[in-house]
Image (cartoon, rainbow, N blue to C red):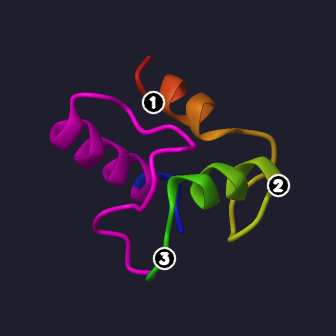
Amino acid sequence: MTIEEILAWADAYRAATGRWPIEESGPVAGAPALGETWRRIDQAPRRGHRGLSAGQSLDQLLRQACR
């Protein structure tokens, strides 16, 4: 998983719903892994899992990308 993938999924979510995803937004449309959820994506960068650096939430990633 990469930051670029997360941001692309978030862009698609926003295009479909008019909102940015949050941890409780449910399944991630277009993600290659079955059962991928926004909660799991939020936790990966927080904890430094799945090849991502630790310390950022989904919200922080989205805010940083929108600058």
Tell me which label, 1 or 2, sits earlier in the chain.
2
Q: Which residues are magenta?
A: 5-33
Left or right of 58 in this view: 43: right
In which image quadrant can residue 14 be found?
top left
Question: Residue at the location (45% across, 81% down)?
Answer: 33
Q: Amino acid at mark 2?
A: Arg
Q: Which disc number belongs to residue 65?
A: 1
Q: Amino acid at mark 3?
A: Gly
Would you name the residue on which mark 2 appears?
A: 47
Image x and y of residue 58, in percent? 59, 40
Tell me which label, 3 or 2, sits earlier in the chain.
3
Q: Secondary structure at mark 2?
A: helix
Can you say whether 22 is above or below 39 in the image?
Answer: above
Question: Residue at the location (57% across, 43% down)?
Answer: 23
Q: Which disc number belongs to residue 35?
A: 3
Q: CA distance from mark 3 to mark 1?
A: 25 Å
Q: Secondary structure at mark 1?
A: helix
User: Front-most of 45 and 43?
Assistant: 43
